[in-house]
């Protein structure tokens, strides 16, 4: 650690991989689906194209735009190790959500 650098503010700063968060929050079913969606430019983090390994933090905005649905959320909490599906909706605030019709 370099002298004169204050690291105390980083102690309470949590980060999590984007693919892990989206899968744990059950927005998409698996990390591999998140990777595929991100590779096909269907996942955005704070308005920018996202990579699966991008780090997310509280307050970040995630958009998932698949052929079946569009969801825009704000992260409000990180998942605990084992969460029930009914509890995962407490992990984020839905900003916008819509289903799409397949033609």
Image (spheres, rainbow, N blue to C red):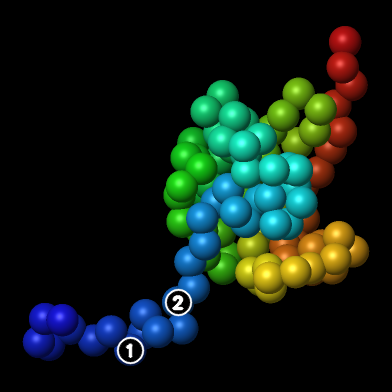
Of 44 and 78, which appears nearest the observer? 78
User: Furthest residue to the top?
Assistant: 103
Q: Quadrant of residue 44?
A: top right
Q: Which class describes the residues within 10 Å of circle 2: few (<14), some (14-19), or many (20+)?
A: few
User: Furthest residue to the front?
Assistant: 82
Q: In the figure, is residue 4 to the left or right of 91?
A: left
Q: Residue at x 75, y 69 (%)?
A: 82
Vertically, is 101 above or below 99? above
User: Furthest residue to the left?
Assistant: 3
Q: In the figure, is residue 63 to the left or right of 69?
A: left
Please tell me whether mark 1 sits on a helix, a strand or a loop.
Answer: helix
Of 57 and 95, which appears nearest the observer? 57
Please tell me whether mark 2 sits on a helix, a strand or a loop.
Answer: loop
Q: Residue at x 80, y 33 (%)?
A: 69
**x and y percent of residue 24 in the render?**
70, 57
**x and y percent of residue 87 in the render?**
84, 68
Residue 32 visible: yes
Query: How far apart, in angstroms, are the residues tagged by discs 2 and 1?
Result: 10 Å
**x and y percent of residue 79 in the render?**
68, 68
Q: Residue at x 62, y 37 (%)?
A: 32
Q: Which class describes the residues within 10 Å of circle 1: few (<14), some (14-19), or many (20+)?
A: few
According to the picture, the residue beneath numbered tag 1 turns out to be: 8
Q: In the figure, is residue 61 to the left or right of 23?
A: left
Q: Which mark is residue 13?
A: 2
């Amino acid at each position: 650690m370099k002298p004169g650098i204050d690291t105390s503010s980083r102690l309470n700063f949590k980060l999590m991989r984007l693919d892990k968060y989206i899968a744990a929050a059950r927005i998409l079913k698996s990390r591999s689906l998140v990777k595929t969606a991100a590779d096909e430019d269907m996942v955005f983090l704070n308005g920018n194209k996202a990579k699966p390994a991008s780090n997310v933090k509280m307050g970040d905005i995630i958009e998932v735009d698949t052929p079946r649905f569009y969801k825009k959320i704000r992260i409000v909490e990180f998942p605990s190790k084992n969460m029930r599906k009914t509890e995962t909706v407490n992990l984020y605030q839905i900003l916008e959500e819509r289903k799409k019709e397949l033609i």
